Image (cartoon, rainbow, N blue to C red):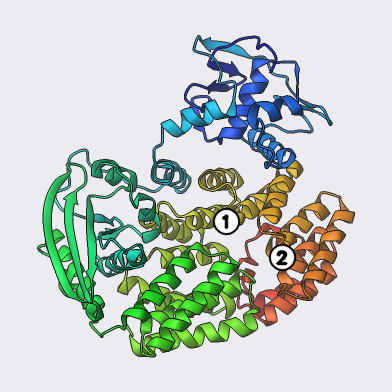
Amino acid sequence: MREATHTDDVVRFGVFRADFRTGELRRQGVPIRLQDKPLQVLAALVECPGELVTRDELRQRLWGDQTFVDFERSLNIAIAKLRTALGDSADSPRFIETLPRRGYRFVAPVTVDTPGAGIPDSGQTMATRRSARRPMLIGALTAAGLAAVVAVVFTVGKQRPASGPSRVESLAVLPLENLSGDPDQEYLADGITDALITELGKRHTVRVISRTSILPYKGARKSLPDIGRELGVDAVVEGSIVRSGDRIRITAQLVEAPSDRHLWAQAFERDVHDVVALYGEVAEAIGNEIHANIDRTEAVAVRARPVDPEAWASYVRGRYLWERQGAENLLKARDYFKQAIDRQPDYALAYAGLADAYLLLAENRVLDPTEAVPKGKEAALKALALDGLLAEAYTSLAGIACTFEADWSGAERAYKRAFELNPSYAIAHQWWGSTLAGLGRHAEAALELRRALELNPASLRVGQSTGRALYLARRYTQAVETYNKTLELDPNFVPALTGLGRVYIALGRKEQALAELEHAATISHRAPASLGPLGQAYGLFGDRSQALTILAELKDLSAHAYVSPLDYADVYLGLRDNDRAFGELHRAAEHRLASLGALKTSVEFDPLRTDPRFADLLRLVNLN
């Protein structure tokens, strides 16, 4: 890189102040979240204001010899994110001017704020400095980042007292440590951890953090006060399991998080065939300890029906894969749940897991919903026939009712029953919040999604659902901020990339929309659900040829994979072919396909609203 005109760490331009020592960008004192690569691009550009910085110079500086990086796409995405943070436009640039096929120029005046040690001159230096400030990405970034964004956006939240709590109102169960000396028993530790979270979550007086948010702490050597602060809880449960032959021993201790004061510790031991009773006993002891005056009528009794150890192991493995989602994981999860049922035909939780697998396989357009949804509903009903107190099964039924049956009142009843049985079940709050947003009940949606985030602060899917809710409420600026915060945790999270692309379409930002949607299509290996929005963007922004190419690609894919009518409808909407779009939407409505719950609120359907056929669509999905 050429000699810089200055080597100071802190610079000002317009209403912005960039501190490259700490990796912060502020607009009139308000912090703006920006990922490493866009910030490094900014550092390179402001070093030489008014001068061309070539794309090759940026490649050398940010990526060096990393030949495996798709440099062109990565740089385009970084520039798009930087422009979004600055509120800049490629067509009328105030800060970053594009010199086609050559590079970029920073066109605003840059002034030095305070002398420092020099703007970092390599991507690695910047990454090193930033990573040193956050020893655990998921815990620190999510709790302090995404939760903060959602709290501001929805203007809800509460302040925690500075001193230690007089009683435990929120709890995190950290991953139990496997001390068996056998790595094959790791599933046992994970499964019992998950079971403890579920059992403790049934107590209405305690908020219990979900499994997804505690997984990053597995094996981490962080202080319990730090963990408690990152997760926003009063107390932490930690412990270990040991399996020897057919005996399992669990040792657990309860610690007050702010003070690191030990409150309770106990060991429990049973035969492996009594694993359900074992973790139920542990949960009961912890519940008694944290609430001496607990309302016994609110506590759901532990079902001590014996569970075959191999069936339980298959269920645990299935849930592990289900939570990670993606087509391959969901298909494997379905098979594990089937294995559990084959091993033990009266295992209610395995049927609930199978219902969830079919639901997401249909919703994510991996399987034809007309085949998958009936199987999912059958499994959920079987789970409730075996155990009428399963919040998971009620949540599955509610998800099917609103996603594929347009039964909004039935879904609401099922969700409320799930909340009664397990108020800490984050998935139920997330799914119901997403449904409420589609129905236009935005204030209620905000409360449910806020609750989901409190229970699962590290969840990418809660972040994505919140961004989607803000998009449906036409709060585009906040939606962009929430999606970007989610993508800081995983830049390749396809649902957030697609959602962000849709927001940019609504804002008319061609460059940013295409960058996000092309990235989503590449990461998903050109999955139909990502191709539809991309084709729509090309059509709306005037590239009819590209839109038609994507339409042909979808038709080719349909020869060997499921392609939803909604994927075709996306592209036809982009091509402004309303007749064909209505045809596909009617086909989707007849089968009550996912995403039609947002017909009343989603901006992509605005061009159709004045057409009488749109009222027919609303009637078909009970939204009139």
x, y (%) of residue 465? 52, 58
The relative height of residue 305 versus residue 170 in the rendered view (above or below) is below
Quadrant of res 605? bottom right
What residue is at 38 percent from the left and 86 percent from the top?
A: 384
Q: Secondary structure at mark 1?
A: helix
* Rendered-image quadrant of the N terminus: top right
x, y (%) of residue 214? 35, 54
Q: Amino acid at mark 1?
A: Arg
Which residue is label 2 attached to?
A: 528
What residue is at 61 percent from the left and 23 percent from the top?
A: 43
State the CA–CA distance, disc 2 to disc 1. 19 Å
x, y (%) of residue 149? 47, 43
Q: Amino acid at mark 2?
A: Pro
Would you call the spot at circle 1 few (<14 residues within 10 Å), some (14-19), or many (20 or more)? Answer: many
Which of the two residues, 31 or 372, is positioned nearer the viewer here?
Answer: 372
Which residue is label 1 attached to?
A: 468
Which of the two residues, 277 or 363, is positioned nearer the viewer here?
Answer: 277
Can residue 7 be seen at all in this image of the molecule? yes
Using residue 574 as the reference point, say whether residue 235 is left or right of it. left
Q: Secondary structure at mark 2?
A: helix
Can residue 397 be seen at all in this image of the molecule? no
What residue is at 61 percent from the left and 69 percent from the top?
A: 364
* Rendered-image quadrant of the C terminus: bottom right
x, y (%) of residue 165? 17, 47
Q: Residue furthest right?
A: 545
